[in-house]
Image (spheres, rainbow, N blue to C red):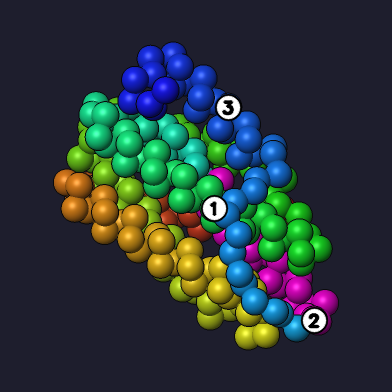
Amino acid sequence: MSARLLSPLDRLVSSLDQGLKTVFAHNVGPAFDAGETPALSPEAAKLAGALMRVNHVGEVCAQALYQSQSLFTRTPELRAHFEHAAQEERSHLAWTQQRIEELGTHTSYLNPLWYAGAFAIGTLAGLAGDKISLGFVVETERQVEEHLASHLDRLPAEDTASRRIVERMKEDEARHAEEAHLAGAAPLPAPVPQLMRLAARVMTRTAHHI
């Protein structure tokens, strides 16, 4: 059945199911050839693992945001837009999770909290209207793009696998921002981007360790 023909209750149940899979399941995405990576020193592996854990949290939050915004959009076309973007972000979720496992570390223990918080924020954006919701996507993806660029500066040069994953993610996030802009995004009120950056800073610093 087409997603746009589902009832609101069906969409809510589907969203809850996807949330449980995002937080608790072993996510599998399309194959991504990250190439061969030489053995990393313990210090390099620890740093790369922490950075990829932060990136994985970002993808957990992306799922929550797109799921909630899809639930509360007014138009079927925009719902399809959010669902398509969420599908692409699920690939990022799987790639970062796999790389974390390869680096011998763990995803964030606080993922249920990150998901719940992002879902609440996405709900508020969705309730504010489609143009604001799209504006929120633009600002979020642009901040994520900046964040990924900073990780490319920090990831060990020899960790080519992580770097290729992050580079691909950065390209996709830039495209998602542009697509949301072309779909009719409205600029967000001045305080909102600053608050988003503050929340992201708290999340990244916490997820780096926990």
Label 2–label 3 contact, CB within 8 A: no
SS under mark 3: helix
Choose top left, top right, bottom left or bottom right for residue 47.
Answer: bottom right
Q: Residue at position x 76%, y 54% from top?
A: 106
Q: Residue under label 3, please give it.
A: 17
- Compute the Cα span from label 3 to label 1: 17 Å
Q: Earlier in the sequence, mark 3 or mark 1?
A: 3
- Compute the Cα span from label 2 to label 3: 38 Å
Specify whether 158 is left or right of 146: right
User: Foreground mark, 1 or 2?
Assistant: 1
Q: Residue at position x 55%, y 25% from top?
A: 16
On residue 91, the disc is 1
Does residue 174 sit above or below 58 in this rendering?
A: below
Question: Residue 89 location, x and y as percent?
Answer: 48, 50
Q: Is residue 128 visible?
A: no
> Which kind of residue does numbered mark 2 sit on?
Ala
Is 56 one of the magenta-colored residues?
A: yes
SS under mark 1: helix
Specify whether 124 is left or right of 35: left
Q: Residue under label 2, please give it.
A: 39
Q: Is the magenta stretch mostly helix, strand or loop?
A: helix
Question: Residue 186 location, x and y as percent?
Answer: 18, 47
Specify whether 62 is left or right of 84: right
Is 53 one of the magenta-colored residues?
A: yes
Q: Residue at position x 50%, y 28% from top?
A: 15
> Which kind of residue does numbered mark 1 sit on?
Ser
Foreground pick, 75 / 115: 75
SS under mark 2: loop
Q: What stretch is highlighted in magenta?
A: 39-60
Does residue 201 sit above or below 26 in this rendering?
A: below
